[in-house]
Amino acid sequence: MIADATALADAIKAGRFSATAAMQAALAAAEAEADLGALTHVDSRLGLAEAARIDAMFAEGGAAAAELAARPFAGVPTLAKDLGGPFVGLPVKAGSALFAARDPDMPLEGAADRSTPDSDLAARFRAAGFCLFGLTTSPEFGLSLSSEPAIGPACRNPLAPTLSAGGSSGGAAAAVAAGIVAIAHATDAGGSIRVPAAACGLVGLKPGRGLMPGGPDFGNHLGGIAAELVVSRSVRDTAASLTALAGAARGPFPPAAAPSIFPTLPQRLRIGLVTDLGADCPVEPARQAAVEAAARSLEADGHLVRRIDKNALAALAATSRRVFETIVCVNLAALFDRLALDEGRVEPISRAAIARGRSLTGAGLWQDLNAMVLVSRDLWALFDDVDLMLTPMLSRAPLPLGAMPTDHADLDLHFSRMACFAPLATLANIAGCPALTLPFGADEDGLPLPLQLLAPMGGEGLLLAAAARLEAEGRWRHRFPIATPLPASPGAREDLSA
């Protein structure tokens, strides 16, 4: 059985099956799992063409095949999120009716140029060997931690179809957890990689500020709180993705090199532990117990575990939430004003966000941007005493579908629901530090018990090493296999791709 995207790429490189056969399997799985609502756009011709190009390079042999063998994900089918990018050939509509009927070759920003190039990140996806064939479901403009856009589809959790897959990268997480693909593009401005990964039993890393490319347009920059990467089935897939995609971002921050990936966790780390933030957003006992169990495992390895002042962390989380709300509202209002978009065609919660963004003064925005700097400073101070922080990712099990509606204008209620579901999600975005979630066991209903690990800026390698150590305990098993063709003997590539 193929375990993850790395194993899938290895099988393609070894000739066990072709990239075309792998793409055909993914397309068949996408069709079979259509009721899941994970995909909002499928282009089989695009996917098969990209796979055929990979197969042709392998068939050519020589330097072309050698070059492909060096790509970590050569021939692996994958999906882009319906937010971020752009990826040439995939018509992002940001989960909104406003863009759903536009010319599919017109970029989200509304320009008429049909030759809009890949974003820098999209180009790196292709250079890593990925073969893209569709877009995954996200809520309108990414404004929810559940992926249920009014235009549809509502994305279900493969582990429990009456529950949400999370958001805003919910479609990506559902597609990976269901095995449609082994790995998928995702974005995170307020927990949008980590929350759906946590809900679906996956690994999700939000890289630190300045590490991931956002050019050439920096349209998903959001004042520095947003980052893009993947949701995956294994720590090694996430590490390989980071190595292939990160670094040399060409602005707007000083250049950050791709982090070193530690082969093993360094000895005698100081692990800061917090299991709850108090009565306002209580964490279910099973989720607290999973964090405690992870701390005991690391302590048994000789690492020093110490409790963090939950009140200090809660104060930083509260400020982060406020700053996040300001930035996303101002950004959305500016987008609509700059492009003279029709806000009457968007969902009520989006209209409320636009209205709030317009109501904020320059002084108010500046105050919150300054608070963002101070959150980063104060979190750095906590890291003076610890090397990593270990926290819950979610306060409770994944929410039922419909529990986070967007058909109302009560923005405070909406943001409060998100904050109580993932109380420490926005902290990493506002502070700029890297943060990672992974499952560490299952509850009595078979749903994942996710952890969150946070590190100082530049600490992605440390996060991945700690996550790999915890993953090795095998407390979580993926329920659904990755869609793959029946294996063939080595050397059968031409027959399989015919």
Image (cartoon, rainbow, N blue to C red):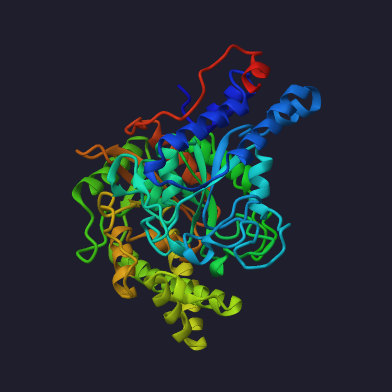
9 sits left or right of 441 in the view:
right
Task: Return the residue nearer the eye: 416 or 47.
Answer: 47
The spot of residue 396 in percent (x, y) is 25, 52
The answer to whether residue 411 is above or below residue 71 is below
Q: Specify whether 3 is left or right of 52.
A: left
At 31% from the left and 75% from the top, the residue drawn is 410
Q: Quadrant of residue 300?
A: top left
Question: In which quadrant of the rendered image does the N terminus lie?
Answer: top left
Q: Is residue 451 above or below residue 341?
A: above
**Residue at position x 29%, y 46% from top?**
291
Residue 299 horizontal/vertical position (percent)? 33, 40
Asked whether 141 or 455 is in front, the reply is: 141
Q: Is residue 260 visible?
A: no
Can residue 187 be seen? yes
Percent x, y for residue 200? Answer: 36, 43
Total labels: the figure holds: 0
Q: Quadrant of the C terminus?
A: top right
Name the residue at the top extreme. 489
Find residue 106 and report its horizontal and vertical position in percent: 64, 61
Quarter where residue 221 is shown: bottom right
Residue ranking furthest to the right: 63
32 above or below 409? above
Depth order, front residue of 104/412? 104
